[in-house]
Image (cartoon, rainbow, N blue to C red):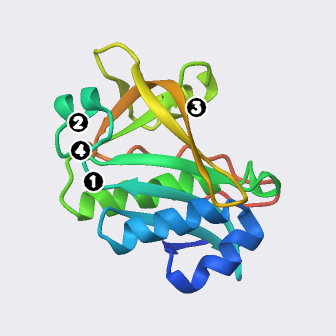
Amino acid sequence: MSYVRIRAAAEKDLPLLAGALGEEPYFVTHLARQRAGHGVLLVAWRAFTPVGHVYLWLAPAEEPEVRDRLPGVPLIVHLRVAPQHRGRRIGSRLMDVAERRLSELGHARVALGVDLDNHRARALYRRRGYRDWPYPPVPTTREVFRPDGRVEALADVCHILVKDLREAPRPCTRRPAPGEARRL
């Protein structure tokens, strides 16, 4: 696996983000939210090419059920890795950095929502230490960022999973790539 660097996005990154990952209206919106102090847009880079991103939602949750039952708990939203870079643990690395950043900011827990039919994602998050919250799935709104700059809000329903960031980190279970030595 080649080197991947993860850092908070900067305004100057917008042309590279939009060019490599599309979704320019998404990045414009989330850079503005970051600038206002409502979150952090983390981007994974291979050399000078963005290959994935995730947003740390630090503002109060939009969904009343989440806001009332998890006050002050940040959300991890919109984790994406470019299709040609999937299967290289970039999403896992983004999650590692996101969780570490939230812990450094003093947060004890983090939450995220998963579509009802996305069983693979739920299984992945459970392996990472996330647990289903004890309430029903939550009605939410999924934002679709159109190329013309419009943002369309679509009704959605998500399972909410929560992780205690104070738990000891789980040992890495990554298998070495072919030809890669396992470090002990």
Residue position for label 3: 121
Q: Which mark is residue 73?
A: 4
Give how far apart the Cα atoms at labels 3 and 1 are.
24 Å
Residue position for label 1: 59
For image coordinates 56% across by 49% down, the residue present is 79
Asked if the residue under mark 1 is in contact with the one under mark 3, i.e. CB atoms within 8 Å, the reply is no
* Disc 4 residue type (three-letter): Val
Specify whether 84 is left or right of 23. Answer: right
Give how far apart the Cα atoms at labels 1 and 4 are.
9 Å
Mark 3, residues whose alpha carbon is within 10 Å: few (<14), some, or many (≥20)? few
In the displayed structure, 145 sits above or below 164; it is below
Q: Is residue 179 visible?
A: yes
Mark 4, residues whose alpha carbon is within 10 Å: few (<14), some, or many (≥20)? many
What is the x, y in percent for residue 68? 17, 31
Asked if the residue under mark 1 is in contact with the one under mark 2, i.e. CB atoms within 8 Å, the reply is no
Residue position for label 2: 67
- 15 or 70: which is nearer to us? 15
